[in-house]
Amino acid sequence: MELEKKYDELKNILRKLEKVVIAYSGGVDSTFLLKVAYDELGENVLAVTVDTPMYPKSEKELAIEIGKEIGVTHKILEIKDGNEIIKFNPEDRCYVCKKNIFKNIKEIGKKNYIENILDGSNTDDLKTYRPGKKALEELEIISPLVLANLNKLEIRKLSKKLELETHNKPSFSCLMTRFEYGEEVTKEKLKEIENCENFLKEIGFKNYRVRKHKHIARIEVDKDERVKFFDIEIFDKVNKYFKSQGFKYVTVDLDGYISGSMDIDIKK
């Protein structure tokens, strides 16, 4: 009953906005937000997906596919020159990057006479280290899922009810989170990580991160998936493939997947 009230509140929030641009990644949260917004506002919804080396090609393709299924007008925003300032991966990288991306999305909104720019942040995001939140606040980006007090689990439940294929999709984050702060990040390094993570997906892992520590790959997988590495054949396949991508050493983190593990030493 409580969840239905939150769902109704979300729909009320969206109806009051009348016309919106939604920053849409194809992930659990933004897909759910897009679907509800489209159901409520129809052609008054514009979805914008960012095309950048920091996000895998497969994520963009999935976003395009789901956008077509929903029926929404969908634009791809290519970011070419905005990454120079964050190439050495500063601690405020997320803030700088979000600011640049959402400034561009706001420009798209202006060209389409839409003032309300939305993102898919949920209440769980308020509890973690997310320097990009400051950029959203400065640019007055609206987070309807937060306003409706919806968390990730609730969004997954409602997504399943709406028959969205993303209801059980693993969480994903920008590939820049795979690098140590201060390391120079190149398109080649981003592709190396993307290829290795795609390989883990291909051999059956569901939730994973490949963290790069110079020439060392530190693999994180869900705790209940760690047992797969007791299979020597899996070990050999992963080791061989990762080294073909440029890593000298390949390791598995015994702690398993930890969201934001590169941020442990950052003062929050």
Image (tube, grey):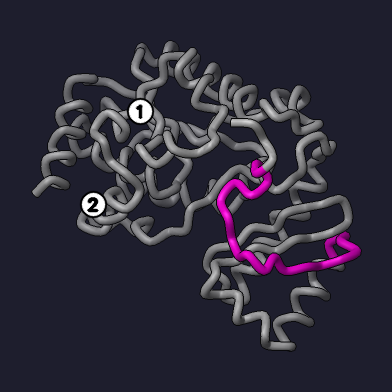
- Is 162 magenta? The answer is no
User: Which residue lies at the image location 35% right of the left edge and 48% below the top edge?
Assistant: 152
Q: Position of residue 75 (x, y in %)?
A: 47, 32
Bounds of the magenta span?
244-264
User: Which residue lies at the image location 45% right of the left edge and 46% below the top edge?
Assistant: 26
Locate residue 220 relative to residue 121 in the image: left or right.
right
Residue carrying label 1: 143
Q: Position of residue 238 (x, y in %)?
A: 75, 74
Mark 1 neighbour density, 10 Å: few (under 14) some (14–19) many (20 or more)? some
Locate residue 120 relative to residue 108 in the image: left or right.
left
Locate residue 175 relative to residue 164 in the image: left or right.
right
User: Which residue lies at the image location 38% right of the left edge and 56% below the top edge?
Assistant: 166
Q: Which mark is residue 158?
A: 2
User: Which residue lies at the image location 49% right of the left edge and 26% below the top edge?
Assistant: 133
Quarter of the figure with residue 6: top left
Task: Name the amino acid type tagged 1.
Answer: Ser
Q: Nearer the viewer, residue 123 or 236?
A: 123
In the rendered view, would you say 23 is above or below 215? above
Q: Nearer the viewer, residue 62 or 17?
A: 17
Per the image, label 1 sits on a secondary structure element best described as loop
Disc 1 from disc 2: Cα separation: 17 Å
In the image, farthest residue toward the bottom: 232
Mark 2 neighbour density, 10 Å: few (under 14) some (14–19) many (20 or more)? some
Majority SS type along the magenta span: loop
In the rendered view, would you say 250 is above or below 175? below
In the rendered view, would you say 138 is above or below 256? above
- Is 263 magenta? The answer is yes
Q: Position of residue 88 (x, y in %)?
A: 81, 31
Per the image, label 2 sits on a secondary structure element best described as helix
Task: Name the amino acid type tagged 2.
Answer: Leu
Q: Are marks 1 and 2 in contact (CB under 8 Å)?
A: no
